[in-house]
Amino acid sequence: MTELPGLDLPTLRRYLDRAVPGLVTGDLSGEVIAGGRSNLTYVVTDGTDRWVVRRPPLGHVLATAHDMGREYRVLTALFPTGYPVPETITLATDPDVIGAPFYVMRFVEGTVHREPSSLAGLVPSLIFDLVDRLADLHAVDPDAVGLGDFGRPAGYNERQVRRWKKQLDLSRSRSVEDLDELHERLAAAPPPVRQGTIVHGDYRIDNAIADGTRIVGVLDWEMSTVGDPLSDVALLLLYTSDRTLSVPGHPSLDDMVERYATRSGRDVSDLSWYRAMAAFKLAVISEGIHYRFTQGLTVGDGFDRVGERVAPLAAQGHDFLGGTDGLRL
């Protein structure tokens, strides 16, 4: 395909010829990668090589979301360590090039498991490898890879509550009182960060590339920072229970937590607040996608029902905190 929403390929070719001379050897074609619900992701090719281009969604971009520079920086820092991330090629911060900032990275061969049925025969080994790679990420010293100033662990959980409430306020198109009440409960008792690490911020099986039972690429780093590693663990558990736990042979959530604890050496005995925060965060993300859908600013299929996830996620969050105490659900 030579015409893509949000990416003019002739313009991209001219930019790459200037920024990375000799990289592209022919006319570009490409396609939008299905499955994404936030940043737009494309695979482009000159007929010989393939690359991936990432840019923010069309319209209604929240102030602190969809930061191409953050993604590019963390990928560039992690690649030399051997951590499984794609190699970066170039970052364009000037929105005038294609209408938004974007970056280019090398294409990684493998499979992104978006459908639970595709995991048949690969679990539990692949899921345990996914957990191991998360523990390995949290073992990387931010200072050693130039990411010491990438985030502030102290007060991280308090800031996360405030940040996602702000994102919710910027995406309001309907009443979400149960979500507002969940925010109040989270804001009342955020736990202190015991040890700050690099956190991915959206870690799950369909944000990873697999080669059989090995993870060979971790993708979608737009929410990465230095913060509380238990936030990544809780979000992975939430995504797993929602999407893949029913696959025969899949490890239980308890098995996944134990695997992480053993590899990381961290105390994971109480994840209640973190799991509630994960539900709040995912609900806010879903509400933002719902808002963009109502404005006609989404690209691809499957956006029409995303808004239906918000109320159940709010209810889940309340349950993690010990019930609703009479709150309206």
Image (cartoon, rainbow, N blue to C red):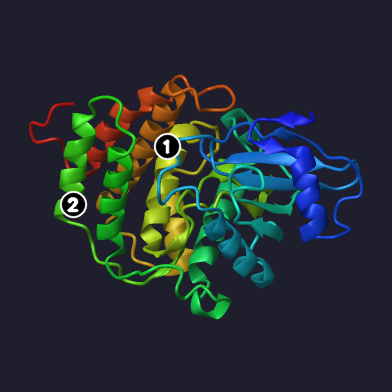
Q: Nearer the viewer, mark 2 or mark 1?
A: 2
Placement of 9 over or under 78, stated as above or below: above
Judged from the image, the secondary structure of the residue bearing numbered disc 2 is: helix
For this rendering, which residue is in front, 9 or 254? Answer: 9
| Quarter of the image where the C terminus is located | top left
Mark 2 touching mark 1, by CB under 8 A?
A: no
Residue 323 is drawn in which quadrant?
A: top left
Residue at left offset 29%, top offset 70%: 154
Whether 122 is drawn above or below 307: the answer is below
- The image quadrant where one finds the N terminus is top right
Left or right of residue 236: residue 95: right
Vertical comparison of 83 with 223: above or below: below
39 lies left or right of 149: right
> Which residue ends up furthest to the top in the rendered image?
304
Residue at 59 percent of width and 49 percent of height: 95
Which amino acid, mark 2?
Ala
Helix, strand or loop at label 1? It is helix
Q: Is residue 103 above or below residue 37?
A: below
> Residue tagged by mark 2?
187
Q: Position of residue 14 (x, y in %)?
A: 80, 49
> Tag 1: residue type?
Ser
Q: Nearer the viewer, residue 324 or 214?
A: 324
Q: In the image, residue 208 lies at what x, y percent?
A: 61, 47
Residue 110, given in percent of the width and then of the height, sits at 74, 45
Q: Residues within 10 Å of mark 1 (few under 14, many from 20)?
A: few
Residue beneath the point at 20% across and 49% down: 186
Q: Which residue is at the front of the view, 187 or 264?
A: 187
Dot 1 corresponds to which residue?
Answer: 241
Report whether residue 124 is seen. Answer: no
Number of marks drawn: 2
Residue 100: image x %, image y %? 58, 45
The residue under the point 37% across, 59% down is 230
